Amino acid sequence: MAYQLNVNGRTVEVGATPDTPLLWVLRDHLGLTGAKYGCGSGYCGACTVHVDGSLTRSCMLPISALAGKEIGTIEALEEQHPELVDAWVQGNVAQCGYCQAGQLMSAAALLDDEPQPTDADIDTAMFGNLCRCGTYVRIRAAIHEAARRRAEKAAQSAQSR
Amino acid sequence: MNPIANLSPSLSSEPSRRHFLGISGVFVLGTCLPACTPQQPQLRPRPQPQLKLKPPATFEPNLFLALEPDGTARVVAHRSEMGQGIRTALAQIVADELDADWSRVKVEQGQGDAKYGDQNTDGSRSILLNYDRLRIAGATARLMLRQAAANVWKVPVEEVSTENHEAIHAATGRSLGYGELAGEAAALSVPENVPQKSIAEHRYIGKDAVHVDAGDIARGKGTYGADYRLPNMATAVVVRCPWLGGGVKSIVNKPTAKPGLVGIEILDPSAPAGPVFNPVGGAAVVAEDTWTAIRIARDLDIEWTDSENRGFSSEALRRSLREAARQPGTPVPNAEKGDVDAAFAAGGRKLSATYETPFLAHAPMEPPVAVADVSGDRCMVHAPLQDPQSARNLIAQWLQFPLENVSVTPTLLGGAFGRKSKPDFALEAVELSKRLQRPVRVQWLREDDIGHDYFHAASAQYHRAVINRRGHPTAWLQRTAFPSITTVFAPQTSMPAGWELEMGFSNLPYRVENQRMESTGIRPGVRIGWLRSVCNIFHAFSANVFADEMAAAAGRDPIEHRLDILAEGGKLTVPGMQPPADHELDIGRLRHVIEQVRTLSEWDRPRREGTGLGFAVHHSFRSYVATVLEVSMANGRPKVSNAYVVLDCGTYINPDTCRAQMEGAVVFGLSLALHGNITMREGTVMQSNFHDYPLLRIAEAPATKVHLVPAQGRLPAGVGEPGVPPVAPALVNALFAATGKRHRTLPIKA
């Protein structure tokens, strides 16, 4: 079956069986390998992407359910969340890094919902993303740092207006 | 003696044979001469145009460094990156001695090749093995660049200094960029015995650095094994026999042609023990894309052949371990001190306890995966491998190819923890690519990873002591029982190896007059492997909890008590055992991390009712780690609010990495203390994914403070593993302080 998808603001055509999960569409058909396979069952969050702005486990969602939806992946996250990506790099958050795309996608969704999250907000929002290396304390710190920078930027642009 | 002056004559000899032979590859970048390369800073006077510089060339003074005419310093990382920051740390060492501009350092991954020496990224020893040689590599290049500049300027090399990628002649204010000098330096012969910087001169060693791959990773661009792609590549998902040693008898519902299906290949099982890293066998579903392979593999109904492991039960094995720990075992040779039996017979306060730990799976976030391309008599493999060199040897043997026809390139490793030391998954890809004569990627599913791991051994320890009023042990008998890693190497072995016992068992650091250590082994029905910190996990657990029990029995503060039962200082000597060179356990350093963690955790500050502090300390991989955890009960489960860790790892390269490894070790240790439990019934692993083999999640992760003991100048020691062993015992000890309940079996049941 041929499907038209909107991925990172671009329309692409993919031929795949209707049950093919978005994860494998991204990775095998579109060459977007940022989202990772970790468990195939929605437990680990390594495959997390945005679908119409909502957090989605791409390993569970078949291509047949994606018509007309906007899919956002880690490859385009920096455009919307430069502070977050930079805070992640400067905070040296990643160890092996395999889960980090999923972590960042969840963190971005959290900041969109709650610009000044508490540790408890972070723990709730990031609960679905496993990290075997144990980067959790740096994830908390980087989200706080990104929130601070975004607030600073918002204040500056408000002033300059 | 001035080594620089002595080396000068040979350095300035030209034209050199090396240059004419073209040993360094020559790269000509357009028509731009070195003097007009764009990256040159404009602040210093420029070299005169009439200066005769040799044509641009790559300066490659050794295996680990190549300097391009554009100034790019390419550093080869010959160890595998699995999150421990090794690609960054190795480059920091070279860049420091080179006086390089960090922004112009580019790290390249070395293939598996004996020319690099040891590449087994395992045992927390990459820095130990490479600190000196990489400093020499950088320092040698820097001296040659100075000499090259001296030759150009016709001044003595002693007058030439370096700073941030430039050679400088201070007296005349002249400077030349390293890139400009590359051609000149490439023509010089390589000097020996080049001195290295003093610690005070270090600019990158011992300083925080963001990991070189951090930017790629945060943008989804890092290339892991799972991400490597080749044209015309097929993907295989292998259905493996639930019990070790079984093979495909028949496929009950073998599918006929299906869209996207390339074929189903039967892989024979390896012998129950050895060759160690051969694949376990199964039915490989090869397809044009991953999902097709997964879907068909999940629907296969396979009849398996029997094997002797089909009756294996982890419960029965653990019962045997428990019983073995209560019986006399094989004494560690020549290690008995005093007369333990007489001390027990003489009376006094006696204390005994049995501790148990389960099988564990590595569960790296990236399940095993490998890409192989066997074409004619050549084979190329890209995979997340901890030891690309031994993998290359095994692959060449497997294919009966000459070694030089096989290349193995490590990708980034999406976690490893010891699992990716075993290249069975790469051999699967190699075999399938050989058969299909096209590139094949083997993708393990999480269920495959949990079900067919080289498991961390289940264990039991028995401790018995006579203690005095102060809780000091006057006699200490300890026994350990576990299936040895050596059982996968040899079909008859069952006894733990000496090196397994040296992981926190036969090198217990306490002052005891009467002491005996005994061990017992057992053959399991599954593959045993090393997991981050290996036998230290259970040995540090039992010894630290038992010491805490001694303190509690005597009503002592656990840290005060622990310092009391350690000697004042000196090196630990274990009768009959010779520690490897510079691997002596330094009691003074052990005491220091204990004292430091007492301060860091504000150990004496009263906590809220219901909150307990627990302490543990352990020496492993040449490092010293003391950990304090702060714990309370919430909703019937332990809640760890704070972790305090002190690490003495000798010379460190990137302190931020050291802190990160301790933070991660706390999480890894809490995962195994609170959740980890692999069981087998009828040879079959009962867990399959993260719902029944849970890992710690963010809400369970404590705030973590790390103190790194300044120890530059000492032998570099391990960082990746030594943070793990103290975590589980610190948790158990904290729970005892909080609740009065003593847990002796992992994982902790509330």
Image (cartoon, coloured by chain):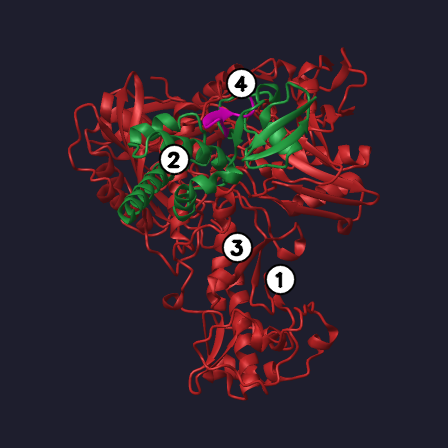
Chain colours: A green, B red
Circle 1 Cα neighbour tier, 10 Å, few/some/many (<14 / 14–19 / ≥20): some
- Left or right: residue B316 versus residue A19 is left
First in sequence: mark 3 vs mark 1: 1
Give the percent coordinates (x, y) of residue B281.
71, 25
Q: Residue at x 65, y 37 (%)?
A: B423
Residue B25: numbered disc? none
- Left or right: residue B528 versus residue B672 is right
**Nearer the observer, disc 3 or disc 1?**
1
Note whether B155 is above or below B203 in the view shown. below
Q: Which residue is mark 2?
A: A136
Note whether B388 is above or below B418 in the view shown. below
- Left or right: residue B572 versus residue B604 is right
User: In this orientation, does residue B340 appear?
Assistant: no
Give the percent coordinates (x, y) of residue B561.
23, 37
As measured in the structure, the alpha-carbon distance from the residue carrying label 3 to the one carrying label 2 is 30 Å
First in sequence: mark 3 vs mark 4: 3
Note whether A94 is above or below B714 in the view shown. above
Callout 1: chain: B
As measured in the structure, the alpha-carbon distance from the residue carrying label 1 to the one carrying label 2 is 37 Å
User: In this orientation, does residue B565 appear?
Assistant: yes
Q: Which residue is mark 1?
A: B63
Label 3 close to label 4 by CB (< 8 Å)? no
Circle 3 Cα neighbour tier, 10 Å, few/some/many (<14 / 14–19 / ≥20): some
Are marks 1 and 2 in one subunit? no
Q: Residue furthest right?
A: B376
Q: Which residue is mark 4?
A: B687
Q: Residue furthest top?
A: B252
Q: Which residue is mark 3?
A: B129
Span highlighted in magenta in the image: A49-60
Callout 2: chain: A
Disc 2 element:
helix
**Amino acid residing under circle 3:** Leu
